[in-house]
Image (cartoon, rainbow, N blue to C red):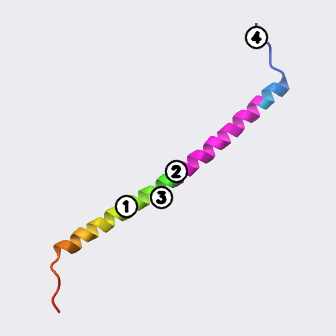
Amino acid sequence: MEQKKSLKQLQAEEARKKDKVKKLTAELNAAKKELGALAKAIAAAKKAEANKKKAAKKPAKKK
């Protein structure tokens, strides 16, 4: 038969779960931040590549 958990045990268990949630939330936020930075870097690289191709298509202007 299962023993009933004491109030202290339940509170300790709840505290551990809250700490775990805090840790996971912090990890998630860090991952979101990193993902955002990567998305910006990809967008910048695509824009640079598009500008490079556009510049290559244009004939050089004569002075």
Q: Nearer the viewer, residue 53 or 10?
A: 53
Residue plotted at (32% across, 66% down)? 47
- Please identify the quadrant where the N terminus is shown: top right
First along the sequence among labels 4 and 2: 4
> What's under tag 1, amino acid-wise?
Ala
Structural distance between the alpha carbons of marks 4 and 1: 57 Å
In the displayed structure image, the side of residue 41 where residue 13 appears, left or right: right
Residue underneath mark 4: 2
- Please identify the quadrant where the C terminus is shown: bottom left
The magenta segment is: 13-33
**Secondary structure category for the residue under label 4:** loop
Q: Position of residue 23 (x, y in %)?
A: 65, 43
First along the sequence among labels 3 and 4: 4
Residue underneath mark 1: 43
Residue plotted at (47% across, 58% down)? 37
**Secondary structure category for the residue under label 2:** helix
Q: Residues within 10 Å of mark 1 (few under 14, many from 20)?
A: few
In the displayed structure image, the side of residue 47 where residue 9 appears, left or right: right
Q: Position of residue 9 (x, y in %)?
A: 81, 25
Q: Residues within 10 Å of mark 2 (few under 14, many from 20)?
A: few
